[in-house]
Amino acid sequence: MWLTDNHSLQKQQLENRREEISGVSLDEEMANMVKYQNSYQAAARMFTTMDEMLDIVINRMGLVGR
């Protein structure tokens, strides 16, 4: 049992050291990914709305005043 605990501790220490050296925080990267995903979804909704508005203007308003 002691060897397993020691191995787990060494593994965790190595992973922590690797993160320190690489300068990458997984929590920060995940937060950024969620932020960018939300931004992408908002932009996609904006384009969908613009497409619907153009469809109304071009196809549904008809010819007025001719």
Image: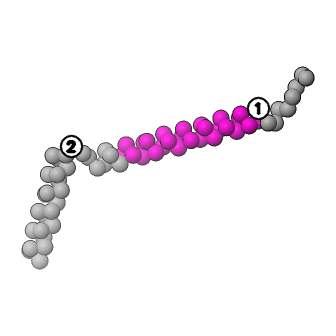
Q: Relative to 52, is 31 on the left or the right?
A: left
Q: Is residue 61 magenta?
A: no
Q: Nearer the viewer, mark 1 or mark 2?
A: 1
Q: Residue at x 77, y 33 (%)?
A: 58
Q: Relative to 57, is 32 on the left or the right?
A: left
Q: What kind of element bears circle 2?
A: loop
Image quadrant assignment for residue 59? top right
N-terminal label among 1 and 2: 2
Mark 1 packing: few (<14 Cα in 10 Å), some, or many (20+)? few
Q: If the image is split into quadrants, where does the C terminus sit?
A: top right
Q: Nearer the viewer, residue 25 or 61?
A: 61
Q: Nearer the viewer, residue 1 or 47?
A: 47
Percent of width and height locating residue 43: 54, 38
The residue lying furthest to the front in this view is: 66
- Name the residue tied to disc 1: 57
Q: If the image is split into quadrants, where does the N terminus sit?
A: bottom left
Figure check: 7 above or below 33: below
Q: Which residues are magenta?
A: 31-56
- Name the residue tied to disc 2: 23
Q: Residue at x 29, y 49 (%)?
A: 26
Q: Residue at x 37, y 43 (%)?
A: 32
Q: Residue at x 59, y 41 (%)?
A: 45
Mark 2 packing: few (<14 Cα in 10 Å), some, or many (20+)? few
- Say which amino acid is labelled 2: Gly
